[in-house]
């Protein structure tokens, strides 16, 4: 039992993988799983950040391992899942959170290189992760996967055409994997956040404080989400308390998609 258990869900004895866990929402999610008793594997291309997240979990009394992995590379993803299984014997829950955005531009001004970069990480990366995670979960007889989509995966997102297309693809992968693997005891869901208060956003709003109120106002709840609020939704979907929920896209968006 971790000495500083402080989350309302219990993942005691569970092995959880979080991609993109070196910062932002991924770090908050990894920390929340750690606090709930899970053994957490953090995968990211940002080595210092990944080690830092793992160190924070160990400091709070949990168990964690960092593995460098570029989710857009088949060999890296295969090696990642092999490493998790070689080290801990199984993979109970996976959170495919690693994702990137490009400069906001009207569709006609977006370029091919940006399209390829976003699709490689956001779509191919999630597909590769699913492929290897599902194989392992199939071998062990069950598991739960949460993919990181976005409100941009549920509707149009002006100036973010490629990002929106990539997140719609994540929703398609989620629904299909859920339908295919339900019989094998594997649940697959996605979370769809609105705007989240990450360090990146905070810095952007520091530069343009007038934008802060505008960004907050697009959400009926009148503010942006905290990373812990997205992490809480991911932990619920991953937990046995969501045992009859699969193929679902959970909007964590302060009501944004309700209007
Ligand atoms: P972030 O940039 O803080 O975190 C993303 C992490 O993914 C970083 O640690 C980065 O190093 C890692 N990463 C990037 N490319 C990678 C690759 N090829 N392989 C492995 N790791 C890689 O961003 P965030 O805001 O925490 O976003 C996390 C996820 O949430 C993304 O999928 C993003 O699209 C989604 N999202 C974010 C928001 C928001 O407002 N921040 C809203 C909706 C959805």
Image (cartoon, helix red, strand yellow):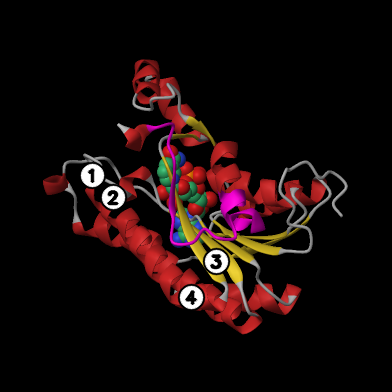
Discs 1, 2 touching: Cβ within 8 Å = yes
Upstream in sequence: badge 1 or badge 2: 1
Instruction: Tell me if mark 1 has few (under 14), some (14-19) or many (20+) residues whose alpha carbon lies within 10 angstroms of its own.
Output: some
**What residue does disc 4 label?**
181
Residue 189's spot in the image, x, y percent? Answer: 48, 59
**What residue does disc 2 label?**
164
**What residue does disc 1 label?**
156
Task: Tell me the number on the disc at residue 69.
Answer: 3
Relative horizontal placement of residue 175, taking residue 16 as reference (left or right): left
Upstream in sequence: badge 1 or badge 3: 3
Image quarter in which the N terminus is found: bottom right
Q: Is residue 240 magenta?
A: yes
Q: Secondary structure at mark 1?
A: loop
Query: Mark 4 to mark 2: distance in Å?
Result: 26 Å
Upstream in sequence: badge 1 or badge 4: 1
Please state which of the two labelled residues, at mark 1 or mark 4, is closer to the viewer: 4
Residue at (55%, 71%) from the top-left corner?
Answer: 186
Query: Mark 1 to mark 2: distance in Å?
Result: 7 Å
Q: Secondary structure at mark 4?
A: helix
Magenta stretch bounds: 234-255
Relative horizontal placement of residue 168, taking residue 51 as reference (left or right): left
């Amino acid at each position: 039992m971790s000495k500083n258990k402080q989350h309302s869900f219990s993942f005691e004895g569970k092995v959880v993988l979080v991609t993109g866990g070196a910062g932002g929402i991924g770090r908050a999610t990894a920390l929340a799983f750690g606090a709930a008793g899970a053994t957490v594997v953090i995968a990211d291309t940002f080595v210092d950040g990944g080690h830092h997240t793992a160190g924070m979990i160990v400091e709070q009394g949990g168990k964690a391992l960092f593995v460098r992995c570029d989710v857009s590379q088949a060999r890296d993803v295969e090696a990642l899942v092999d490493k998790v299984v070689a080290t801990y014997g199984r993979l109970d829950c996976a959170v495919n959170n690693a994702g990137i955005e490009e400069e906001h531009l009207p569709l006609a001004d977006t370029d091919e290189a940006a399209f390829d970069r976003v699709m490689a990480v956001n779509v191919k990366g999630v597909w590769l992760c699913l492929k290897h995670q599902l194989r392992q979960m199939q071998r062990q007889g069950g598991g739960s996967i949460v993919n990181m989509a976005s409100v941009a995966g549920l509707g149009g997102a002006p100036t973010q055409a490629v990002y929106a297309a990539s997140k719609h693809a994540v929703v398609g992968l989620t629904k299909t994997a859920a339908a295919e693997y339900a019989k094998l005891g594997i649940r697959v869901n996605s979370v769809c956040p609105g705007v989240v208060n990450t360090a990146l956003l905070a810095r952007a709003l520091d530069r343009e404080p007038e934008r802060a109120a505008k960004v907050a106002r697009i959400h009926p709840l009148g503010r942006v989400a905290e990373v812990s609020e997205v992490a809480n939704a991911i932990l619920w979907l991953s937990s046995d308390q969501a045992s009859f929920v699969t193929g679902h896209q959970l909007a964590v968006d302060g009501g944004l998609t309700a209007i």
